[in-house]
Image (spheres, helix red, strand yellow):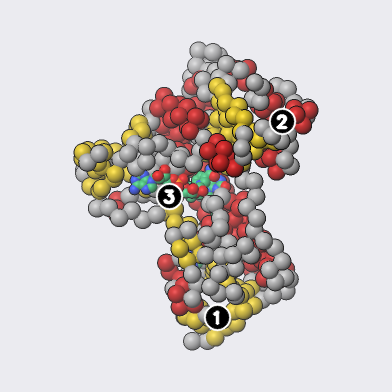
Amino acid sequence: MKNKHYNVFVIGSGIAGQTAAKICRENNLSVAISDNREFGGTCANRGCDSKKILLQFSQLVYQSNKFQGLGVKKNPKLNWKQVQKFRRSFSNPIPPKTEQNLKDLGMSLYHQSPKFISKNEVEVEGKVVSADYFVIATGNIPRPLDIDGNEFLKVSEDVLDLKKIPKSITFIGSGYIAMEFACMLATLGSQVTILEREKTALANFDQFLVEKLITKLESLGVKFIFNADVTGVKKLKKNLEVSFSIDGEVTTHKSRLVINAAGRVPAIEALDLEKADIEADHDGIVVNDYLQSKSHSKVYACGDVSNKSLALTPLSGLQGYIAGNNIIKENSKTFDVPCIPSTVFTTPNLSSVGYGEEDAKARYKNIKVYQGDASNWFNAKKENEDTYAYTILVNERTDEIVGAHILSSEANESINVFATAIYNKMTVKEFKRMVFTYPSYVIDLKSMMEN
Ligand SMILES: Cc1cc2nc3c(=O)[nH]c(=O)nc-3n(C[C@H](O)[C@H](O)[C@H](O)COP(=O)(O)OP(=O)(O)OC[C@H]3O[C@@H](n4cnc5c(N)ncnc54)[C@H](O)[C@@H]3O)c2cc1C
Ligand SMILES: NC(=O)c1ccc[n+]([C@@H]2O[C@H](COP(=O)([O-])OP(=O)(O)OC[C@H]3O[C@@H](n4cnc5c(N)ncnc54)[C@H](O)[C@@H]3O)[C@@H](O)[C@H]2O)c1
């Protein structure tokens, strides 16, 4: 075994790992980066970007459906093979381009999972490699479900890779992943069933809006089954049969595919963290505000795998930036949880930023809740869209906007205006002084804060 030494060894080549690695390399440290899959990480290879490309096609079908008899004669017929070819034209170049870019910057690349063998050494590709610092940025993986027949379950990346639209499909879970894909596949003609163990979907989102979203997805043909305790999956001739119980009563449901969308967990099992005294819990590697391991000061963790992140691409990038900077200039930056907007890319989008109603009421004495159905406003009516609603939360004492939740076809964009307002502690009065374009969804945001 030939020994190697680097200033920094980065594990994981997603947005978090790449960002940290590049900062270290730009500051003339010797850097190695490893990945046990294709380089480039989840978002670019098998997550956000591929999903957003496919969703455009179901949205096209959804939009033309709504205008049937209002000017549109026939729905577009999709050629799914071509759709997938278009999607792959984005994702296929990512691994070679990423590798080339990292090599050009002068990094050494490894294509295996390293295993810690001591506090400052890993074993990888048959070599013992030591480093002054390690950055763990291995992301999340689908939560393994401990049920009979779990080998028949597929996961989100299989949905992105579908060769054809399945006749029927079942999702276990009703979080971001299940809701987005359920909406897409129902629009494209699949019979979709969602099995959720809780009593509602998207538990962390504004429930006034979630209820409306559920109704919308039901109108597209999605069947929701709540309080379902999934116990097993059996392979039949053409279908899979999922067994689940509700209040102890066992039922079964058949579909062509069953997707495990029951959440994602930190990818740490292969690393032998205990050999280096690196503490981890079910949220990931336990880090302080500098994103430094609490049990090992030469180890930083960033992105989905750190216990201080939400699994969103912009946060992983931000954490990579902080970890990289804290290595080159010892602990110069802290991770202060910013105001984080996020969107469930269903049709319509469900977007959220700042406090939810419950948390806002716990944090502030008097909260003004502006909540309403805007489906009779011009923007919805011009799209022949029956679903448009909002919940805006304002601290009554200061008039500051502290939370915004929107269900609309453009919510993924308009929520960023509220993110800016909340970040800058804008009051309703200041917000209403702004001039926005007309007609636009953003101009509606002012009307949402009327009595
Ligand atoms: C289907 C899907 C859709 C999503 N959509 C959105 C969206 O619309 N918007 C949004 O903000 N977020 C979205 N996300 C979440 C987003 O993709 C992640 O938050 C983000 O990619 C995390 O980046 P990361 O760098 O922390 O981890 P990753 O990008 O997951 O990178 C981790 C890397 O580490 C590698 N790795 C893992 N274990 C090891 C090991 N033992 N040794 C070596 N390498 C290892 C992995 O192969 C991977 O390349 C989505 C996720 C999924 C699954
Ligand atoms: N648009 C986006 O920004 C986007 C899209 C996809 C994923 N993501 C990120 O990835 C993360 C993972 O997404 P996800 O949808 O897999 O997870 P999630 O945590 O959002 O949702 C998982 C759902 O599965 C349910 N569940 C858990 N175990 C179950 C079981 N045994 N049976 C039935 N239901 C069960 C949970 O109650 C929950 O509703 C998200 O939290 C998010 O941070 C973001």
In terms of image quadrants, where is residue 429? top right
Q: Position of residue 313 (x, y in %)?
A: 58, 51
- Mark 3 or 2, nearer chain start: 3
Q: Residue at x 42, y 37 (%)?
A: 201
Q: CA distance from mark 3 to mark 2?
A: 36 Å
Residue 42's place in the image compared with 181, above or below, is: below
Residue 338 vs residue 349, the one in the foreground: 338
**Amino acid identity at mark 1:** Asn
Q: Position of residue 410 (x, y in %)?
A: 61, 31
Q: Which mark is residue 263?
A: 3
Circle nearer the viewer, 1 or 2: 2
Q: CA distance from mark 3 to mark 1?
A: 32 Å
Which residue lies most toward the front here?
A: 365
Q: Quadrant of the C terminus?
A: top right
**Amino acid identity at mark 2:** Val
* Residue hosting label 1: 120
In terms of image quadrants, where is residue 240? top left
Q: Helix or strand or loop: what does disc 1 sit on?
A: loop
Q: Residue at x 72, y 30 (%)?
A: 428
Q: Residues within 10 Å of mark 3 (few under 14, many from 20)?
A: some
* Residue hosting label 2: 428
